[in-house]
Structures are given as C-alpha cells and as structure tokens.
Amino acid sequence: MSAARAGAGGATPPPHAPEFEVVPREGGIVAVRFVAMASPCELLLETAETHTAHEMGRVAAQEAWRIESKYSRYRPGSIVSVINRSQGHAVVVDGETAALLDYAAQCHLLSDGRFDITSGVLRRCWRFDGSDRLPEPGAVAALLPLIGFEKVQWRASRITVPAGMEIDFGGIGKEYAVDRVLCLIAARFAGAALVNFGGDLAANRAPGTGPWQVGVERPGTEREARLLLELSRGGLATSGDTHRFLLRDGVRYGHILDVRTGWPVPQVPRSVTVAATSCVEAGMCATFAMLQGIGAEAFLEEQGFRYWCLR
Amino acid sequence: MQLKRPRSPLHLGLMAASCALLSDSARAQAAPDDAAEKPLQIDTDLLYYKENAGRVQTIEPVVSLKKDFGDQRLLDGTLTLDTLSGATPNGAIPSRKPQTFASPSSTSLTPKPGYKTTLYTIAPGDLPQDPHFKERRVAGDLDWSQPIGLDNTVSYGGHASTEHDFDSVAVHVGLSHDFNEKNTTLSAGINEEYDRIHAHGGNPVAGSDYALYEKEPSQTKNLAGGLIGVTQVMRRNWLTELNYTFDHSQGYLTDPYRIISVLDDTGAVTGYRYENRPDTRTRQSLYWVNKVALGPTVLDLSYRRGKDSWGIGSDTVDAKLRIDLGSGMSLEPHARWYHQSAADFYNLYLSETGPAPTYMSADPRLAAFAATTFGLKFGIATRRNGELSLRLEQYQQRPSDQASSLAELQGLDLNPNLKATIVQLSWHLEY
Amino acid sequence: MRIQSIARLAILLSLMLGACGCTSLGVKPWQREILARPEMALNAAPIDAAIDDHIYFSKEAASGGRSFAGGGCGCN
C-alpha cells in the first residue's frame, strides 16, 4: 500500500467564503450575483428559500471560477498556460480539456477554418482601444505562420502546439461555463433556473409564472433599445462589435479578425443574437455569423438558426 | 419572429458537436481521474539483472493487473517469477591457498556412502563463491482499496511467495484520511509477515564449526511492522510525503549459507564457522519524498534515513528527472546514492585466538559500504494510453576499505566491489 | 537510545511542515491540473519501484520506507 494519496479533487466543493450576493426578486425568483470571467454573472432560481439560493450560488460560482482558473491565459498553472509554454512538446490533457479541443477542432472544420483557437497571437499587434493606431502590415503578416489549428497535433489525449503558437479558449469558455453551471444546478435543484454570464445565457425550463423575460443590450443603437425576448429553455448568446474597434480615416476596423489575412473581417454586424439548444451552440453560431461579415444575415438565414441581427 | 428554414448540415453539425462537448465533459467531470473510462490497467515487465565476476544473474518477468470498479474501488494483483543463477559469495575471504567448500545442498562435507557431496574449489586469491547457485521464485500480491465516506480510504492485501528454500506469507491493512480540502492526507498501517526457512541440505546450527556440518530442520521467523505518514500538497506543482516505518523481526534471522573464515595470527585459514545473527531485529526508517513539476519536467527527490538494532545506520538519496521529449516520448535520468554502516557483529573474519563472539557474520550486505546507481529510462507513448519503456541502470557497491596487517592477507582483495547491470523492459496498457 | 533519535527527527520534520501553516499550504480543488498528471503521482511507476526495492533488499541492509515490505524473499 502506498502510504498516502493526496486526493485528485474534492468530490464536493468545500465551503467557500461567499463572494456572491443573493437578491430576492419578484415573482418567486431569487437572483445570485457574482463576478467571473471578467463579467457580471447571475443565477436566477425559482425558489422561496434563500439557503437553497446560497447553496446553488456556491455551486455556480465555484464552477465558474474553476473553469476560469483552469482555462485562463493569465494564470501560469492553467492547462492553457502549460500548453502555450510547452515549446512544441506534447502535453497530456484531461477529459474535459480533450472535449473542448475536440469541439474547437470540429468548429474549425465547420467554419472552413475561420474559427481558430490559435488566432490569439494576433493580439500582439492588434489593440482595439478606439484609437487610429493600426499595426504595420509586415507585423501582421509575420504572425500568420503562427496561426492555424491544422498545424496543431491533437491525438489520443496529447496536444502538441508548435513553438511560437498559442491556443486559447476565449471564444468558447464563457458559453461552456454557462452550460456547465446550468447542468450542475439542474442536477441539484428541482425548480426552473437561468444562468446568465454577461449576456450569454441558458435556462433549463420556464418558471411557473411564464417564460423568462430576457433583455439583450444593444449599445450604440438609437435610443439604446433593448431587444426583449422570451426564453423557456435552451441557450442564448450575443456577439457584438460595438466596444472594441479602431477608427482610421473614417474606416472602422472591428475586432473580429480573419485568420487567413490577419486583418479585421469587413462589415461585421453590430450585434448578432442567436437562440439554440445550448449556450455553447448559440455562441459558436453567433461567432460564425460575425466571421461572415457582410454575409452574416444570409448565413444565419441559410443555416436555419433563430437569430436577431443588427447592423 | 421570422419563420426559420430547416436546419442545414452545418447547423446540425454544430448542434451535434455542442451536444458532444457537453456530454463528454460531463462524463469527464464525473470521473476526474478518467479511471471510469479506462478501468483496467495491465503492466508487463521483464527484468534482467547481472552482476560482475560471474556472480548472480536474474531474469524476472512481472505481470500486474489493476482494475477500477468505479468510485475509487481498486483491485491490484501482481505475479512475479524470478529465476536466479550464477555464483554467490559464501562469506569466506580469499586466501593464498586454494579453499574447498561443499555446496549447501550437500549432506556431508566429505564423501561418505549414502551422503551427497558436491564440492567446489576456489583458486588462491579468488573470492570464495558457490557456483552452483540456482533458484526459482514465484510471488503473488493482491491488494484492495476503497473509500469510506468522503475523506477516508481503507486498503488491505496479502502476499505469498515460494522458492526452494524459503516460503513467505504477509498481510497488511492501512487507513488514510484526507482533510484540508484534500491537501493533507494522514496514513497509518500495519503489516505482518511469516517466513519459513528450509535451506538446501538443512539449516546449519548457527555459529557452529563448518567442519562438523551440523544441520537442523526448517526454522521460522516473523515480522510485525507499522507505518505512519503524512502527504501534503505544498504548491500547485509540489507534492511531498513523509513516512515513518518501524518493524520488529524475530526468529531465525541468520543466513543459512554464509560462513566466516577463522584465521590464525599470520592470517592463514584454520577453519570456518557458520554465521550467527541475533534472533531479534528492530528497524526504523524515515522517508521523505517530493514530486515537483517544473513545466513539463517532473523531479522526484527523496531521502531516507534508516537505523536498526543491529547497529546499521543508512542514508539514501534518490533523484529522478522526467524530461518530456515531445511526441509522447520521455527520458528519465536517475541517480541514487546509498551509504550504510556495518552491523555490530559484522567481521570480515574471526581470529582463532581471542574469545569467540556470540554473534558473527561476514555477509558483505551487513558491512559498511557506499553504493551508487546511475540509470536512464526511455519511454514512448503507445495506443490505449499505453507506454513502452526501457530502463538501463548500473549499480556499484564499494565497501569501506578494510586493510589488514596480517601477513598472509597482504595483496589480497578481501572485499571486492560489486557491480551490477539492470535492464528492464516495461509495457503499460489501459482498457 | 538509538531508536529515539529517528523518532525525534520525524517529530521535528512534522512540526516544520505544521509550522509552515498547513492551512495556508495547498491548492483549491480547481487548481489540481498539474497534480492530476499521471507522472506527478507519488507511486507513478509502481513496478519499477517494486523491482528496485527487491534488488536493494537483497543487496543492502536497509529496506522499504516508501510503503510496506511486500513480503519476504530468501535473498537476505
């Protein structure tokens, strides 16, 4: 017998100093609010009991922080950091990371290469701060050889990212966390629940009083109108281009980049909202649409998605 | 709300992929060790061990199966076969004159009708070794461990082995408790072993004159021991464990094949005696091991301090560095340094004049020596989360110099170095 | 008594570990990705360890420490 084994992970999250707040709302709904993934996060539960809300809030917050920590680019110990520092050496990944990589690989294929988790290196020369500072064409072109998910070897739980290349799950992480949290809540909570991480949301069913009333922000529009939707179950995600951009000589450069050229996709819609079976599916669909630029509406119409598009 | 078109192939593909992501990751989260997905592990190993100067040589195949029954309930079974051959030192020291000994399986030192005598003669200056050493051993281990509640694990198991001159059975029970968000684990365990020694040709009467060749029927010994340990997660990349073990043996602890040379004042051999060790032995050890991840590289560093009631103190430092070479290949250099002090009753030889000690042994394994091991292990990943690896090590024992002033012993290498080569092929599979 | 000094060493090391403030040592459950790697397990290569223990048991006077003696052999 080996003397001892440090457990691989707690079966249930231990009591954690609550960094979330519980706010009762009308209609028999309680809201739990916390911050994760640099967004205001909210869990809406159809319950009268605040202790249940506290418990579910804890589950939700722990899971959000777990995913944030595990896949954060900024934490040196995260699996993403380990992979990005591996200098071309194979890294063995666990089951959850393997599932995310499989998903990234399939989305890369489904989008004809437009969706690419290795595109993050373009951050090195693009800073979308609203100024007119565009990067040198040479600098952008120099990064293109370091982009391309087809250059990554992903097989049998081992990922090999060539030296100089990077991956990040920024385009999947938040939506994935929403679906995961809803899954954990639904396993422990009998009532209706809605998870909302900064506009990416999912619900398991409508509360007794009727479908969830969701307001989607549309910044930059006339009258800042909100899109009002009714959601019973499934996911809803919004991709927007209003906040991060560069403006030069009257031309607006949005932050959705075309990985084949390294330059922004022209004529991207201001906002695309998609409803689907899960938040991850809705978010990826909205991302695909944005990547189509001028063809976003036609793309969404063709593929038979439920969408709301704003130019 | 606009009427929507039927879902396109791309839409269906995205739906399927998203669904797969959520169910795959849910399954992975349910079994964070991935053990439920790969419940059976099979390990087959082949060891080849060879000492220098025609000494012991071993070929040892090992097969091990580990089955996860879900919820951290594990069954572990191992079968080991050991075939040894070669020459093994008998404890006497070299001499200027040829020396003749009887192989232990002999029933008489001198040829007599009705008795079996197999003699071997050692040339002057050579280390006396019995060239007829041949042994085959079969050993089996079975262990079970399972959780009790959220934070505890119980384990128990047994071992049995048999060879021509030795049989052993052992059992052990252990308990461990996790706390501090599973960052700290306390463990405790006890074990008990019962052995029967029935040497080839009978067990010699301990300490008796070799020439008399007095033998006894089989003897037994037993060992009772315990362990307490603590494992602590120090950092995200650093795990440490500290174990304290103690055990007490009693019974026939003597080596039935070893003799000790009896010399006169000039150093000439006048005879031999069978060795005689105390019939109790208490041992303790403190073992500290660390695993540190430095990026993809992993360092394994340990130190062990041992002490026993025979006066033997030991220190062991062991270091391994697992280097990831990419494409599923790894290289692991290994270095071990060991030092022990001699047993109180250890003597290279006995003097004819002077009082005969109660306990005596010339077994080089009880002498003072330093030993080093240098090795390299190369591994390559295979299908089914498997790995094929080759380990090559070189072990060398250097006894502390024992210069003698006796005339007859000048120029003789009384306690030569031991060198051994270790080659191990391993194959790990998961189903 | 010789037995006492090793026990004293054990107590000293344990106190050192305790003094580091065990409550401040350790990681959160979601910070275990490195520790979960198979090569980070303390018994990552159990058969290698068993083979080595057997070799050193038959060639040296000290043995074990890592776990229990698996059982005897006639080689010492």
Image (spheres, helix red, strand yellow):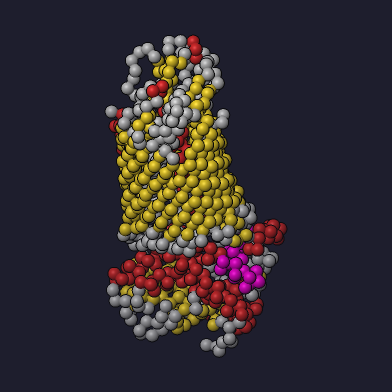
As for residue A111 lying within the magenta part, the answer is yes
Q: Which of B220/A283 is in front?
A: B220
Place of residue A26 in the rendered image (x, y in percent of width and height, measured from the top left): 33, 79
Task: Tell me the magenta residue range.
Answer: A102-129
- Asked if residue B83 lies left or right of residue B166, the reply is right
Q: Residue at x 31, y 31 (%)?
A: B279
Q: Residue at x 51, y 39 (%)?
A: B84
Q: Residue at x 67, y 68 (%)?
A: A249
Place of residue B223 in the rendered image (x, y in percent of width and height, measured from the top left): 32, 39
Place of residue A269 in the rendered image (x, y in percent of width and height, measured from the top left): 60, 76
Residue C73 appears in the picture as rendered? yes
Q: Which of B92/A8 is in front?
A: B92
| Number of numbered discs | 0
Q: Which of A115/B298 is in front?
A: B298
As for residue B419 lying within the magenta part, the answer is no
Q: Residue at x 60, y 67 (%)?
A: A105
Residue B324 appears in the picture as rendered? no
Q: Quadrant of the C terminus of chain A?
A: bottom right
